Image (cartoon, helix red, strand yellow):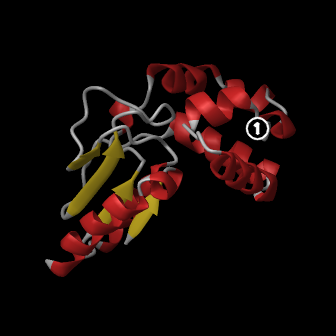
Amino acid sequence: MWGVSFGGMIAVEMAKLLKPNVTIVISGTILSEDLPIIYKLAGKLGIIKFTPANILKSSNGLTQNYFFGTKLKEEKALLNEIVKDTDANFLKWAIGSIVKWKNNTKPANLVWIHGNNDKILYTKKAKPDFLIKDGTHFMVYQNANEISEILNSVLAKI
């Protein structure tokens, strides 16, 4: 089983119950203690409850360039399409789930792939199994070949 970003956090929860041969998390986090402090604070204060869902869908230079790390015109266009296609209420629920997430268990057989330049689910103290140099939160697109090689090597071992 596998997941990217928030999907990786869902994969962690599923792995604790289903015990698959391997769980792969890409651009996500494994333990809630590794969430950025600002997320934890937002969760404690319940800020997401008061934030209109449509505001969360805004895509601008700050979100594109800084948070997601998109650089090329085609990357920005793809991110805009993803944001446009994401239901605002689902996005609000997902962000609310992230900021309130509590997990202190790393499931067995978990492989974590993360970028050292991820500004969304970043942490300096966690140690991923594979650290992608200059990898952003958009690295599944930007570093697809490198990630594909890692996935092929991991899957060849099971």
Amino acid type, residue under disc 1 in the picture? Ser
Q: Where is residue 105 in the image (x, y as percent from the top left)?
A: 26, 48
Query: SS for tag 1?
Result: loop
* Residue drawn at x 79%, y 36% as measured from the top left: 58
Residue toward you, 111 or 140: 140
Q: Position of residue 15 (x, y in %)?
A: 33, 65
Q: Is residue 54 visible?
A: yes
Residue 18 is left or right of residue 76, and the answer is left
* Residue drawn at x 20%, y 70% as measured from the top left: 154
Residue toward you, 81 or 28: 81
Report which quarter residue 71 is drawn in. top right
Residue 122 is left or right of residue 53, and the answer is left
Residue 82 is left or right of residue 65, and the answer is right
Residue toward you, 128 or 99: 128
Q: Position of residue 111 (x, y in %)?
A: 24, 59
Look at the picture and state if 149 lies above or below 87. Answer: below
* Residue drawn at x 52%, y 48% as measured from the top left: 138
**Residue at the disc numbered 1:** 59
Residue toward you, 118 or 88: 118
Q: Give the residue at the far left of this rendering.
A: 157
Q: Where is residue 142 in the image (x, y as percent from the top left)?
A: 48, 52
Q: Can residue 158 be seen in this view?
A: no
- Give the quarter of the figure containing the C terminus: bottom left
